[in-house]
């Protein structure tokens, strides 16, 4: 067996995989060079410099696993790798300390004016009064997202004597209280409590522009903002305006929507109290060593016949268990994703029902796929390995029921999501080997193929409703791929379920909701 290590990965990676395979350590290749050489290798270790395209994967006749020494896998065509049966692994924990420490460093540098004071002193000046700072002791820090990085930041802030407020709908109040922080269940109650706010969430449709002109207006005057997570969670134009008018006293930003072209960022050239760094969150020698060791050990394990612990695209399960249910795996994930996005609020419990022939099988892979679908709508780096662990750590109750009564279908999957603001139910079936259908959403019976972009639009039963919705979608230059209209006779309502050719932006969704007779239209994004 042969392993290719490239992108200047730490030497530890090559040393570890050399225990089970021959190793080539080469510079970053062009796409053509990869296509010419990738057939020689059983495994590949990269960082962010290499772009592993479908063309490269198609040429990889022997490749079994790709290891990304880092968190993000945007530079790998996951769909192509999955279709070819190539495992893709990353290192979701290797940069936790680095990212958390960078967040704290940015906060302290911001309040003590360290960058400007450093530059002034290097110029031979002695402007002590000009750079009078602010202490963080006794101040309040708002943490949005209590994952591994957010938790570390919160603990350090508490040790510095700060009061910490946490907003995370996927974290229980008990966990927050046990660490010494205060749990805030509603964002509207969160904004006005904080002297500092830091974000530690993935960039999703829910978190994009989470901090914007509207939410900044709800914050304290003189609030200070930190973003070391993903560019676009804080709206950069709105932040620039708030810095200019003094609503935001200062900000520290490490990530941008236009990386690496920083000159295109609205914050570029801002002379106010602003610290900008070039995405340094994971840039420590320790983090680079940690991620290299992590992915190398996973590749060593897989090449030795074992399982990867951080597979991001396919489940690390025994073929005997996976084979009987593999055709239902994506359906299970889509049903979980659909149900989760149908209702807002804090997740409390999940009820899963398997009917028909599925009741006689080991459905553990399907249960994991459902959890992956549910959590991946709002969390980053959820995979088939860590999804059950996430559910357990967050104290979410899971109830699974099997029934050999098949109803109208050979096998069906039903997911009920229970939140503090209500419940929602979604059912899916296979009507042929690769033909998936969503057949029930709450009280509405339907039959529509789950696709990447979908709309669920309850509405009153009256003329022109479909035409009005279609007009909005058309005006937004969005194509309608498919539509199902289903009645709920008990409530005198119907529901349009529409699959579209592209994402439905918030302004178009709001326009649909403004149509008289529409009842809380929802945009749903499903994985592939």
Image (tube, helix red, strand yellow):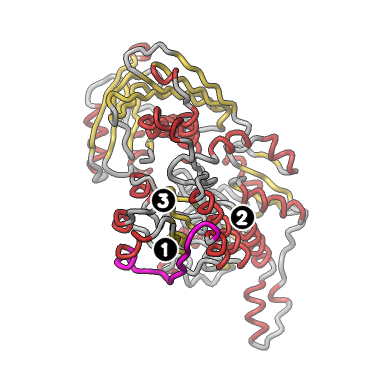
Q: Is 30 in the magenta? A: yes
Identify the residue under disc 1: 258
Q: Is 87 in the magenta? A: no
* First in sequence: mark 1 vs mark 2: 2
Category of crowding for the residue at label 3, using alpha-carbon neighbours closer than 10 angstroms: few (below 14), some (14–19), many (at least 20): some
Residue 453: where, in percent of width, then height?
A: 33, 39
Position of 221 compared to 30: left or right? Answer: right
Is residue 400 among what the camera can see? yes
Image mark for residue 96: 2
Quarter of the image where one finds residue 515: top left
Is residue 213 among what the camera can see? no
Residue 335: where, in percent of width, then height?
A: 41, 30
Position of 178 compared to 7: left or right? Answer: right
Q: Residue at x 59, y 47 (%)?
A: 144
- Between the residue at mark 1 and the residue at mark 2, the CA separation in whole angstroms equals 24 Å
Image mark for residue 64: 3
* First in sequence: mark 2 vs mark 3: 3
Is residue 512 or residue 353 the one in the foreground? Answer: 353
Q: Residue at x 32, y 68 (%)?
A: 33
Q: Residue at x 45, y 67 (%)?
A: 24
Callout 2 secondary element: helix
């Amino acid at each position: 067996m042969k392993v290719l290590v490239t992108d200047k990965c730490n030497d530890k990676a090559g040393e570890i995989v050399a225990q089970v395979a021959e190793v080539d350590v080469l510079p970053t290749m062009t796409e053509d060079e990869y296509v010419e050489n990738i057939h020689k290798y059983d495994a590949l270790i990269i960082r962010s410099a290499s772009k592993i395209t479908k063309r490269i994967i198609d040429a990889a006749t022997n490749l079994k696993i790709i290891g990304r020494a880092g968190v993000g896998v945007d530079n790998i065509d996951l769909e192509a790798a999955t279709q070819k049966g190539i495992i893709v692994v990353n290192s979701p924990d290797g940069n936790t300390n680095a990212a958390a420490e960078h967040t704290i460093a940015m906060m302290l540098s911001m309040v003590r004016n360290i960058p400007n004071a450093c530059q002034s002193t290097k110029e031979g000046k002695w402007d002590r009064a000009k750079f009078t700072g602010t202490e963080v002791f006794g101040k309040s820090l708002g943490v949005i997202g209590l994952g591994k990085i957010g938790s570390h930041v919160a603990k350090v802030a508490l040790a510095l004597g700060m009061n910490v407020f946490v907003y995370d709908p996927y974290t229980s109040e008990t966990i927050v209280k046990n660490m010494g922080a205060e749990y805030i269940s509603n964002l509207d109650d969160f904004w006005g409590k904080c002297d500092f706010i830091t974000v530690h969430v993935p960039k999703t449709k829910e978190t994009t522009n989470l901090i914007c002109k509207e939410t900044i207006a709800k914050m304290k005057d003189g609030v200070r903002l930190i973003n070391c997570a993903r560019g676009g969670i804080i709206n950069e134009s709105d932040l620039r305006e708030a810095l200019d008018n003094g609503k935001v006293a200062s900000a520290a930003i490490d990530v941008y929507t236009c990386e690496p072209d920083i000159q295109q960022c609205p914050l570029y050239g801002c002379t106010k109290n602003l610290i900008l760094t070039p995405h340094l969150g994971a840039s420590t020698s320790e983090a680079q060593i940690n991620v290299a060791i992590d992915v190398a050990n996973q590749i060593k394990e897989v090449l030795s016949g074992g399982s990867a612990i951080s597979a991001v695209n396919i489940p690390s399960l025994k073929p005997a268990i996976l084979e009987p249910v593999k055709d239902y795996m994506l359906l299970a994930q889509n049903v979980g994703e659909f149900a989760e996005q149908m209702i807002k609020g804090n997740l409390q419990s999940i009820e899963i029902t398997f009917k028909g022939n599925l009741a006689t099988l080991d459905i553990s892979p399907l249960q994991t796929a459902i959890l992956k679908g549910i959590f991946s709508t709002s969390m980053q780096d959820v995979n088939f390995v860590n999804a059950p662990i996430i559910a357990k750590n967050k104290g979410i109750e899971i109830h699974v029921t099997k029934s050999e009564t098949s109803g109208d279908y050979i096998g069906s999957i039903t997911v009920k999501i229970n939140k503090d603001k209500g419940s929602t139910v979604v059912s899916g079936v296979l009507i042929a080997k690769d033909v998936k259908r969503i057949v029930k959403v709450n009280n509405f019976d339907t039959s529509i193929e789950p696709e990447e972009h979908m709309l669920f639009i309850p509405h009153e039963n009256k003329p022109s409703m479909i035409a009005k919705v279609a007009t909005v979608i058309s005006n937004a230059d969005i194509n309608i791929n498919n539509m199902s209209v289903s009645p709920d006779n008990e409530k005198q309502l119907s529901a349009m379920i529409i699959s579209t050719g592209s994402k439905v932006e918030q302004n178009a969704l709001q326009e649909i909701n403004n149509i008289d007779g529409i009842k809380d239209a929802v945009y749903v994004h499903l994985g592939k």
